[in-house]
Amino acid sequence: MSNKYVITIGRQFGSGGRAVGQKLAEKLNIPFYDKELISIAAKESGLSPEVFKDVDETAANSLLYSLSMGLYSFGNGPLAMGDLPVNDKLYILQHQIIRELATKEPCVIVGRCADYVLKDNPHCVNIFIHADIAYRKKRAIVVHNIEEKRAESIINKTDKTRANYYSFYSGQKWGQPQNYDLCIDSSKLSDDQIVELICEYVKLRG
C-alpha cells in the first residue's frame, strides 16, 4: 500500500474520529497530529500552549478572508500578528504547519480545516466521520466521561463550534459530502473496520 498520502479526518463530536485517526496512523506507521499541532504552534510562536488550548478550533470574528487564504503579508514585509485575536494566530500557525508537514511526510491530521488547507494537494485523502446522536451520546458518556444529562448539549455545542470554525476559515459548510473523499457512519462499523475501509480506499487510489 502506498505510504505517500496525507489523510485528514473531520469528525462530529462523539463519533470516534480521533480514535480512528490514531489507529489509522499506527497501522500505517505514520505520524498522527491532533492536539500535537497546538504544541508545535506554541513552540514556533514562542507562546505557551495554554494560550492556545482554549481557542483551538474556535473561530474569531476579525480576521480578513484574505488572511485565511494564506496571504499573510502586507507589502514587502511579514504580517505582524501581535494585534490579531489568539484564535486567528493559532489558525495561521496551524495552517502553515499543516502545509509544511504535508510536504515532508505522510501523516494523519485531525480537524483544523486540514482538508481545506490541503485542497490543492493531490496526495491528500479527506475523511469525515459521523454518526447518529444516540451513538454519539453513548460514546461521549463512556469515552469522554460526560454526564448523561449533559451529553447531548455538549455534543451539539461542540459540533456548532467546529462548524463555525470550518465555515469561517474555509468559506465552506462543515460536513458536506462534496468536501470529502469518504464520509463514514461510525455507528455501523467498529473503529478497526473503519481503519480497514480507509486503508482499502487509499490502496485503490494507488
Image (cartoon, grey):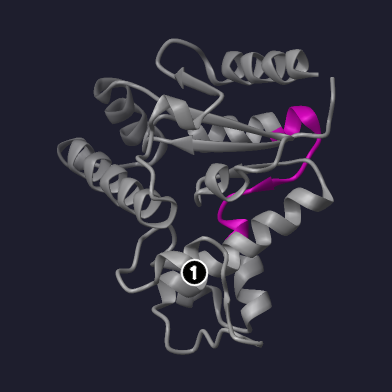
Circle 1 SS class: helix
Among the 4 quarters of the image, the one containing residue 36: bottom right
Q: Quadrant of residue 47?
A: bottom right
Circle 1 residue: 67
In the picture, measured across the screen, residue 16 lies left or right of residue 4, that is left
Residue lying at the far left in this picture: please name it: 149
Question: Which percent across, then down, holds residue 76?
Answer: 66, 87
Image coords of residue 11 (percent x, y): 44, 35
The magenta span reads: 25-37
Q: Is residue 110 above or below residue 100?
A: above
User: Does residue 206 appear left or right of residue 202 in this picture?
Assistant: right
Question: What residue type is disc 1 on?
Answer: Leu
> Is 52 a magenta residue?
no
Please indicate whether residue 4 sits to the left or right of residue 56 in the image: right
| On-image quarter of the C terminus | top right
Q: Residue at x 50, y 46 (%)?
A: 111
Q: Position of residue 115 (x, y in %)?
A: 56, 42
Residue toward you, 134 or 177 = 177
Q: Nearer the viewer, residue 89 or 199?
A: 89
Q: Is residue 96 left or right of residue 10?
A: right
Residue located 37% across and 54% down the image: 165
| Above or below: residue 72 compared with residue 103 | below
